[in-house]
Structure formats: C-alpha cells, structure tokens
Amino acid sequence: MPSPPPISSKVQSTRWSTCRRRNRQLVVDIFSIDSLTDGHIAAILDRADLHLAANRESRRSTTLRDKIVFNLFYENSTRTLMSFATAAHRLGASVVTLPVGQSSVKKGETLADTARTLGAMRPDAIVIRHPETGAPSRVAELVDAPVLNAGDGTNEHPTQALLDAATLRAHFGRVDGLTVAICGDIRHSRVAHSNALLLPRLGANVRLAGPLELMPDELSARPTVDDAIAGADVVMMLRVQRERLDRDLGDGPGEYLSRYGLTAERLRRAAPNAVVMHPGPMNRGIEIEDSVADDQQRSLITRQVEYGVAVRMACLELAAGAID
Ligand code: NCD
C-alpha cells in the first residue's frame, strides 16, 4: 500500500518558512511538520538521542540557561504539558505556565490580546496548545519569541510526530522502510496528521485506518483496521476523540474494541516483531486491550514518553537558536 498524500488541505496550508530574525537572533517557529526542513528534522532526532542518554544519567544541560519559556495550554494535557516543562527545566530554562482556566481568557480576552500581553513580558519561547487550527502562527505574528505548536485543534502536533519518529529510530535503528499502521480516529487526530507528513519523509510507508465515520473525507484509501495491521512493523493506536464529535458513535459496550481496537488476537496479523505505540491518553478496553498496552515486549508507549522530553529539549534548542 503506498503512503497516503497529505490528508488535509488545512495541513498543506501551513507550509511556510518559519525562520525569523528577531533581535539579531535567528529563531525557528515549529508550527507543523512542513515548517521544518530536512536539516531541522535530522538535527532534532540526533540531538534527542544525546538528550535521552544524558537524561538517563541525570546529566543537565545549560543551553537555555536564564531563558524563560511560557506554556499556554488552552486544551487539557498531561504528557505534552509536563514534557515541555521538564524539557525546558533540563536545559536550564525557567517555565511559566499560564493557568488558562483562571486567566483573562475567561473574561473574554482574545487570543491576539493575550499574545501581545505575553509577548510584552519578553519570553524566550512560547509553547501553545489551542483548539483552533493555525493558532500558533497567529500568535507568532504578534510576538518576538519563537512559537512551538503543542497541538492546534485537529490540525497538527509536530513534536508528537517527532518523538514517535525518534522512538522508532531508536528501536529499529531506522525509520526508512518501516510499515506503520495508524488506526482509530484519524479524522480528529493531529497526531495522525503530523505523522502522515513526517514518517513518509523519513521513508516509512504509512497506512491509515479506522471506522469510516472517523476517516477524513479527502482520503480515498480506506483499508480496514485488519488490512492496515496485516504485516505492519508498527501499530499506532489512537483514542476516539469523543469531545470533538458532533454526535456520539453510538457503539455498544465492547463494540469498538472488537471491531476496530487492538486486541492481542488482531496484533497477531502484524509482522512477527511488530511494536505497539499510542500517543496517550489511552482508553483501555476501547481502542486497546490491557494485555497489549502492558506487553513489555511489544509496547513502546513508555519509551515514547521518555523520548518526548528529549525531542522537546531539541525542539526548544532549535527554536531558541541554541542549535542550528
Ligand atoms: C494527543 C493530543 O492531545 O493530540 N495526545 C498527546 O498529545 N500525547 C492525543 C489525544 O488527545 O488523544
């Protein structure tokens, strides 16, 4: 099965160069996979390997010493929020997190006004998660600091795709030539969208599959989950994003798992040494069976989280001009 084309015109519309020169320093915004050059991607992956090794030995880096990173999360997060904050701390930076739920956003302040306000405090980088496509680039137009996209609605989640690629590269020694089945709620998954752009750039063959009502309209290839998993080296499962659905799927208890979820039985269709990934949060018993999620031989889920910190360290360094 060939790799699919970019699955959303929204994704393509974010293709622009994002190097800006501010205060005589070159900063790099990370809005989307297409906003990164091949050189950026290679630098991030290589640097992440070094950071991962250093983190395991509790060795600190000081490349962002005295810098201030702002975290702005307009949507819920555990992994990405903590991971960016940990990454910044491990580089010697300070993190200031805006408690969006208790902020002036609740008094009706616009994103643009919040951006101008925070920009005036002169942070060295801004990490933003927001429900609207393109919010990171709108903020970047109003601030000097580089902006990193921690997920914009259903559009993109570039640092998640980068950490997925880093995890695969560490496990298999390569991404080139791997067949990756991404299964579940493709329509609403910014993780799937960014991976569908990044992994083929690194030479992987990506298959996207899920319930028909959760597949993007513009995708013509719609294999079943069973067909997508057949012979795959990697099975990446996605959560059904019920909070983004107009109407409920109407599935009965156990129905989603038996029709579309990753059970131990379904995983037997994959390549003999296939691995399992999930960006989290997992809905156990829905898109993934407990025994698969907890299979120490097959599951790379905790490794993904560990690489998340290392990759975000590299992304912060790139954005803030500490590496090129
Ligand atoms: C995902 C997200 O928020 O896009 N999680 C993550 O960042 N690791 C996926 C999800 O919410 O299901």
Image: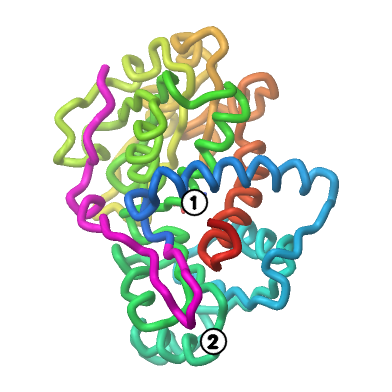
Magenta-tinted stretch: 1-29
Residue 38's disc is: none
- Dividing the picture into quadrants, the one containing residue 183 is top left
- Where residue 164 sits: x, y (%)? 52, 38
- In the picture, measured across the screen, residue 149 lies left or right of residue 56, that is left
Residue 119 shown left or right of residue 309 in the figure? left
Image quadrant for the N terminus?
top left
Q: Residue 312 location, x and y as percent?
A: 58, 55
Give the labeled residue for mark 1: 159
Q: Secondary structure at mark 1?
A: helix
Mark drawn on residue 122: 2
- Rendered position, 214 above or below 178: below
Q: Amino acid at mark 1?
A: Thr
Farthest front residue?
24
**Helix, strand or loop at mark 2:** loop
Q: Quick one: label 2, few (<14), some, or many (20+) residues within 10 Å?
A: some
Does 271 appear above or below 182? above
Horizontal side, residue 257 vs residue 248: left or right: right
N-term-proximal mark, 1 vs 2? 2
Name the residue located 47 percent from the left edge and 34 percent from the top edge. 286
Does 149 sit above or below residue 192? below
* Residue ID at (42%, 82%): 143
Q: Tell me the mark number nearer the camera, choosing from 1 and 2.
A: 2
264 drawn magenta:
no
Amino acid type at mark 2: Arg
